[in-house]
Amino acid sequence: MQSILLTFDYELPLGGVLNNYEESLFKPTDQLMKSASKMDVPLVFFVDILCYIQFKNNRLDQFCDRFKQQVQQMILDGHDVQLHLHPHWLKTKIKDNQFVTDAPFSLSDYSDTQIQFFIQTGVESLNKMVQEVKNEYQCVAFRAGGYNFGTKQALIVDLLFQHGIRFDASIAKGYYFKSDTSVVDYRHCPENPHWFLKGINPKHQILEIPIASKPKSWFEIPTFLKLKWYKSRSVDRGKMIHTFTQYTRNEKWNQFLSSRMLTIDNYTFSLSFLLTVIHYQIKIHKNIENSAFCLIGHPKAMGLYSLELLENLIKKIQYNNDLNIITFNSIENIYKENESN
């Protein structure tokens, strides 16, 4: 039987919030956790911990207290809390709910010493926050900010391993993204359902549990039409950090052909489409035992439509018994099985 992890990046809109932090992050996360409780399923939250640290540096205690309380509640409710790093936060100015920075976006754009600091600070701060309510807790999984490992993947993997991380969930096979600040290219990945990312030290390796994806169909309705037709489903809680001005024709083509992720964020996706992605994932790895993949979402991007879509998807999964819904702290067997192969 294959397994699915319901993963959500717990982060603010990176360019600034539209109204306030409660509306942009905390309230939609509360709604998501309420849905999970009703459905009796565990979630995985990848927590943008460097955001919390920068707010703490700026003595924005009201935000920090609410952030910490909500992360600890995730643990008390039986969910996973894992590491998510957006390194630009520590060089971001916070003013009137707007976030201004010219810092690089990817971890790989920083010096080796800075990368070490980001990872060590992130792991230690997140574990300390969580261990106040669950003594033995240790985060074991990582997701790169914007899915972007950059060019220093081996160094990053090495450092993550040294700090107790054993899983990654940053990669979606066939995904391509290009903005003025970030380039992500996962068009050439191993065929296996998961594989080890190697550190500089060959003994340091972390297991990739990818975000489920499916090649784009030539027969899909054009995205710009769907965005217009289904606009009433969308939510607007803040500004993006990405801009899109420096595109070559080839880059536009690559982005047009990018695989579709299994995501709750896209308000143009239907339940039948998400099930198509899942069935594709199950089919191509049907002969492999103990395989797993991720669904991804962001509370900041989820409105009523996304919550309803998630609940209906979970009902389908539970009814058909096609998948186990698991967390990273429950899949040591998958790691050990791959390590022995």
Image (spheres, rainbow, N blue to C red):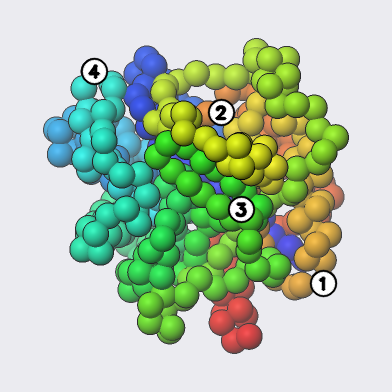
Look at the image and tell me whether residue 36 can be seen.
no
Q: Which residue is drawn at 15% across and 33% down?
A: 58
What numbered label is drawn on residue 287? 1
For this view, does 196 lie left or right of residue 54?
Answer: right
User: Disc 1 and disc 2: Cα gap in Å?
Assistant: 34 Å
Query: What residue would you read off at disc 2?
Result: 302
Disc 3 residue type (three-letter): Ala
Disc 1 residue type (three-letter): Asn
Q: Where is residue 314 in the image (x, y as percent from the top left)?
A: 71, 42
In which quarter of the view is residue 190 placed? bottom right
In which quarter of the view is residue 252 placed? top right
Look at the image and tell me whether residue 209 can be seen.
yes
Disc 4 residue type (three-letter): Asp
Classify the position of the N terminus by image quarter. Answer: bottom right
Residue furthest bottom as drawn? 340
Q: Would you place residue 106 above or below residue 163 in this image?
A: above
Query: What residue would you read off at disc 4?
Result: 96
Disc 2 residue type (three-letter): Met
Contact, mark 4 vs mark 3 (Cβ under 8 Å): no
User: Disc 2 and disc 4: Cα gap in Å?
Assistant: 23 Å
Q: Between 182 and 248, which is closer to the camera in this rendering?
A: 248
> Which one is earlier in the sequence, the residue at label 2 or at label 3?
3
What numbered label is drawn on residue 137? none
Q: Where is residue 177 in the image (x, y as percent from the top left)?
A: 55, 43
User: Disc 4 and disc 3: Cα gap in Å?
Assistant: 35 Å
User: Disc 2 and disc 3: Cα gap in Å?
Assistant: 20 Å
> Which one is earlier in the sequence, the residue at label 3 or at label 1?
3
Callout 3: SS? loop
Q: Which residue is drawn at 56% across and 28% down?
A: 302
Q: Residue at x 34, y 18 (%)?
A: 20
What numbered label is drawn on residue 172? 3
